[in-house]
Amino acid sequence: MVTNLPAEAKAKWVKVMEAKTPEEKLKALMEFLSAIPKHKGTENLVRQVRRQIAILRREIEEKKRTKRRGGGPKFFVEKEGAAQIVILGLTNSGKSTLISTLTNAKPVISDIPYTTQTPVVGMMPYEDIQFQLVEAPALIEGASEGVAWGLKTIGLARNADAILILLDASNNPISQLKVILRELSNARILITKPKGRVEIERRSSGGIQIAIMGKLVNATLDDVRLLLHSYRIYHALVKIYGEVSLSDIEDAIYENAVYKPAVIVLNKIDLIDKNSIKALINRIRGIVGTDIPVIAVSAIKGIGLKELGKILFEITGIIRVYTKQPNDDKPSDRPLILRKGATVLDAAKAIHSALYKRFKYARVWGPSAKYPGERVGGDHILMDRDILEIHVKK
Ligand SMILES: Nc1nc2c(ncn2[C@@H]2O[C@H](COP(=O)(O)OP(=O)(O)OP(=O)(O)O)[C@@H](O)[C@H]2O)c(=O)[nH]1
Ligand SMILES: [Mg+2]
């Protein structure tokens, strides 16, 4: 939504963008808020800014508190394996049970609410790779506004590669789902793929450059320039992927929406009858659409979990590439993990910067090769299970 803010308010937003510390940012946000005219057209923006203020206040408070205590429990989980998947659900939905069925982790499982208070991490094997599962402490209503440890749980979801939404089928799963969707949406974590994507790289010179890899809808390049100028952004590279409107670009200036692929897992189906399972799945699909996979499982009995690895593989868009030295017969057993659309040069970069810098050509065997050992250039797009041999300049 393009809000048509007065110049004064936009100027205040520049101050928010330039703030270096959370304290500065909080002050700038408050000034921005008071400069926004309050009417129907700015309602959403006002709500968003109030939320940001609440979050920042909380963070500043937390920081002071942990300083006094000398550091609290660690909530950031370093990524390992092919992708990091955060298990998000209300308390007692069975998050700990699920992670202990699927991985080597041994968290406490209990009927007592809020048993898990710090992230639990485990590795889940799938074919020749592993997913890192992270049980986030239970999501609570108001999490995105800073209730209790809510922001930490949201932070885990924001940092993950994908989100597993866990629902307790025996305890009002639809209203659980609604709470979770509301919190995610408040926190600007999108689980349905937006039609387009905007990246804005601020620069020190060169004016506003716009690279359109997709389509700009209902706006001209000059509209984009004017919009950025109105925020006093005069030098930037704006990259547009997919279908993007002017308000998507304004959203990107406020830089807070992220997209995370998701799967919905309906747990404890051993407690309800078959017909209710079907009905629930249909209702869930009615709410989230058909792009998000939904499965029904019993974490305690290990029922329905077989498909999960494949689903995680698909939603995270992983491909595996097996590299091989020019003189070896066999590629490595351990695949290189890349994302769909990755090129030979992306692979080279991921292996070693020297391979990338001195890249000459490559040979490919497998799904992306026209014939075994096809000679390809750096922009060749790889596919899952390709074998890759990189040749460098001497
Ligand atoms: N019948 C049944 N009970 C389950 C299933 N999964 C979990 N439970 C039970 O649900 C209760 C809560 O399970 P936990 O795995 O501790 O739930 P949690 O989501 O980790 O809960 P907190 O960490 O406290 O937020 C326990 O009594 C589990 O035994 C299941 O598939 N079927
Ligand atoms: Mg738990």
Image (cartoon, helix red, strand yellow):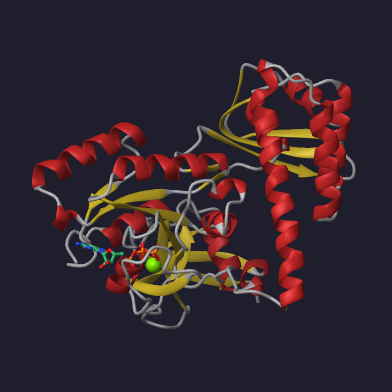
In which quadrant of this rendering is ligand 1 seen? bottom left
Figure label count: 0
Residue plotted at (68% across, 49% down): 55
Left or right: 36 as drawn, with respect to 358: right
271 w.r.t. 13: above or below:
below
Point out the residue furthest to the left here: 274
Q: Residue furthest front?
A: 112
Answer above or below: position of 237 versus 126: above
Residue 249 appears in the rendering: no
Residue at image coords 50%, 44%: 184
Against 224, residue 206 (above or below) is: below
Residue in front for this viewpoint, 154 or 227: 154
Residue 323 sits in quarter? bottom left
Given residues 217 and 52, the one toward you in this image is 52
Q: Residue at x 90, y 42 (%)?
A: 205
Quadrant of the drawing holding the C terminus: bottom right
Q: Position of residue 387 (x, y in %)?
A: 39, 68
In the rendered view, tell whether residue 295 sits above or below residue 128. Answer: above
Name the residue rendered at 40%, 77% in the picture: 334
Q: Is residue 186 something that shows in the picture? A: yes
Residue 271 lies, in percent from the top left, at: 15, 55
* Image location of residue 5, percent across then percent down: 79, 21
Please indicate whether residue 238 sits to the left or right of residue 23 in the image.
Answer: left
- Where's residue 299, x and y in %? 24, 64
Q: Is residue 190 left or right of residue 254?
A: left
